[in-house]
Structure formats: C-alpha cells, structure tokens
Image (spheres, rainbow, N blue to C red):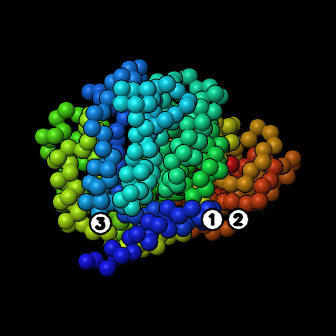
Amino acid sequence: MNRYIFLLPFMLATLMSSARQKPLRELQQAFVDLRFGMFIHYNMPTYSIEDWPDPDMPVSAFAPTQLDCSQWAKAAKSAGMTYGCLTTKHHSGFCIWDTKTTDYNSMQSPAKVDVVRQYVDAFREEGLAVMLYFSILDTHHRIRPGHIKPDHTKFIKAQLKELLTNYGDITALIIDGWDAPWSRISYDEIPFEEIYDYIKSLQPDCLVMDLNAAKYPREALFYTDIKSYEQGAGQKISTSENRLPALACLPLQRTWFWKASMPTDLLRDVRWLVDENIRPYNDAYCNFILNVAPNRDGLMDANALEALRRIGQIWHHDGPTKPVPECDAPIIGHNIAKGKPTEYSWSYDYGIGDFANDDDFATGWTSHPTKEEPWWEVDLGGKKRISLVTIVEETKGSIQTYRLEYKKGKRWHTIFEGIVPECRVKQHRFSPVKAEKVRITVTRHHGKLALSEVGVY
C-alpha cells in the first residue's frame, strides 16, 4: 500500500476541523494538497436538453426517483478523489436545498428532497471533504444584467447563510456567473467585498473561489482565494509558469450536465486525464476537479463509474504537494479608479490613457517610444481612502524603475520609488491615506511600455 495513504485521513481531518481563522496560506496549501476531486453538476439542467434551461422550467420537472449520493461518494473514492463539489444553484436559479428564500427549490419538487443534505452527509461518511458551487447569475430570480437591485445582494446573502450555517464546515465555495463576459454582472453591482467578507464571517476557513480566470491576469489573485481555470472554455494553466494556488476543471462527459446520449457516449480518455491533467497540474500547485454528471434518476451512469474505477487503478494520492510559493493576498475591494478621468504623457497611436482603467485587461495605455519618462495619472473624483494600487503591464519586464504617488491638496506624496521585480502584476499595499489623484511615472524602461490596467483600492 502507498505509504501516503496513511496520511490522507489526517490531511482531510485537518482541512475539515472546526478550528477557525487559519492563515489563508495554510488553507490554500491544504486545498492544493487535496490534489483531485469530483465536480457534480446536478440541478434543473439535468432535466433539460440544454445546460442553460428555460429559467421558468417548472419545479415538477426536477424528479429523481433513485437519488443516491452515497453512490456518488463511493465513485469519487474509487478514483482516489478527496472531495466533492455540488452545484447548489446554477444559472437558472433552481435551489437543490431546503431554502426559505424561494419556492423554486427541490423541496417543492415531486422528490421533496434536500440534495445538499444528502450530498454532504454521504461524502463525509466516506471521509471526503465537502465544497459547494453557487451561481451569482440567477435568471429565474432576475439577477441578471440590467435588472440588478439592492435586494438581490440581500437575497444572495440569505441563500449563502443557509448553505454556510446548516451543512457543517464547507472547505470551499466555488462561485460562478459573476464578472464574466457572458454574465455581465460586475463586482460593483453585486459587491464582491461585501459578499466575500460575509462568507468569511460565517465560515472564516471557507475558501472563496470565483471562476473568473478568463478576465484577470494569471499572475495575481484578483477576486478569488484560488486561481481557477475552466479548460473547456479555453482557459489553460501554464504548468511551467504558474506560482499561485490553482484549480483546473474539465467534465468527464461531453457536457457539464447529463444528456440522454451519455450512457453510451465515448468519455474522456482515462490515461490522458491522469497523465496530461492530474499529475502535471498537481506538480504546478494546481488541484484538478473532474465533473461527473448524475442522470435523471439521480445516479451516475455505468460507463462513468467504470472510468472512475480505472482512474483509481492508475492514479493514487501521493500525499502533500510541494509548498505553494508565497503570493500576495487576494484583491477583493472596489476599484475606485475604474472609468475615472485620466491624464498622461504622449501615447502611441490609439493606445490612449483611458484604456488603462477601463476594466478590460485586453486593452491598455501605450506610451510613445520617444518619451523617456512617461507618466499616467487618474483623478479619483475627490478625497478617497486608499491602501492598495495595482499596476498590470501588457508584458512583464518593460518597466525597470518607477515612482508611484498620490495627490492630496496641492502636494504629491510618494508611495513607492525604485527598482521593481520583473513581474507583470505589481501590487503596492500601504497604510490608508486620503487621495485625490494617483500618478505613475516610469523613470526607466526598455522596449514597448504598455499598462493594461491600473487599479486603486
């Protein structure tokens, strides 16, 4: 027997213990050390022909007749997985727990079942850690672009309170449908920092993991405790360059939710999943989560069960991964520089300074190559309390030295001046100050100088 198998119960017990307020770095390391888990997309889309069903699909459509979460847990165990993550609410807003916030839930269905309760109990019975997935985008309850109201934040917090107080310790909450190009709900409309702090107030050791890697640079933790990569959406982690605690995900079947052809579909190759995903990602500080979709009876298909069994034959948990490198704390606040007026030295072509704070990392300000000491500043619109500035270069290494300042009244005050490490994302944290403007002056650089995005928090 692999000697590390004896370590696994201890690792899980440590991760799932009731001790509170562990350092974030310790939680991130414990998450990466879990190595491999099961995503379970099971919700109203299971009973539709689409992963995005009609948001007014009747509650009666959710009708499992043989729901068996113990089967799911045993299947995860057979593959060597160490945890599960269940879709408590997907984008169409159906809740599969005993919620008091809406009648659009599984307790009102013919099954009259609290799926989350059965799931957490079954996975813990097998010694597996428990995570939950939750969508901010909710088309049934009209939490969608153009319809966001203050009451929606209260509604979301009420649902999160149920999930985080009624079902024991939750290792991580994976959040989706927020600040993505396809959801278009910003971190300002549903305030990220407020939700993040609320989750931590309920369960301080619960990691908050927002599936937002498509938008933000891979070199920093923007609005998440763990960097995530949805490979099916083209988000590919660099196994040679990643230095952040990370998660990569793929479905075993052809879609996230169950479809009628799946019992006879060709599934992803088991050897490929192990050799090209689990092993190299684990070596790059990345946990791999494989989705397995239960069918409309509430069971996993025989071909999926066999694939998981075969994974368990060729892959075994080898204990803790190597230590995750030190990294900056997550950026969770409201970017008060976003969309504010800018001034700047001569730009090159159409790369004007307004692109450096437009909340789009694919655009930026490009300095004209003749400028020896280019500068860029943003007007915050009055005195604002700030304690963090982020500077994202288009490509790392063009800036060699620079000065970062803030203006209060008629005076400019220096926050930082000197040589910077060769990294694309530069973060400056400092004691809070009142500032009216922020300015960056690049005193030495080489090659093309382009700032993708500047944030002030």
Mark 2 and mark 1 lie on one chain; the one further toward the N terminus is 1
Q: Which residue is mark 1?
A: 401
The answer to whether 83 is drawn above or below residue 420 in the figure is: above
Q: Which residue is mark 3?
A: 279
The answer to whether 45 is drawn above or below residue 363 in the figure is: above
Image mark for residue 291: none
Image mark for residue 417: 2
Inspect this view and state whether residue 396 appears.
Answer: no
Amino acid type, label 1? Thr
- Crowdedness near tag 2: few (<14), some (14–19) or many (≥20) residues, C-alpha within 10 Å: some
Q: Secondary structure at mark 3?
A: helix
* Left/right of residue 117 with respect to residue 407 in the rendered view: left
Report the residue at 29% width, 66% height from top.
279
Marks 2 & 1, CB-CB < 8 Å contact: yes
Q: Quadrant of residue 41?
A: top left
Q: Secondary structure at mark 1?
A: strand
* Left/right of residue 444 with respect to residue 182 in the rendered view: right
* Left/right of residue 434 with respect to residue 343 in the rendered view: right
- Crowdedness near tag 3: few (<14), some (14–19) or many (≥20) residues, C-alpha within 10 Å: some
- Crowdedness near tag 1: few (<14), some (14–19) or many (≥20) residues, C-alpha within 10 Å: some
Could you tell me how far apart the alpha carbons at marks 1 and 3 are, in whole angstroms? 39 Å
Amino acid type, label 3? Arg
Mark 2 and mark 3 lie on one chain; the one further toward the N terminus is 3
Mark 1 and mark 3 lie on one chain; the one further toward the N terminus is 3
Q: Secondary structure at mark 2?
A: strand
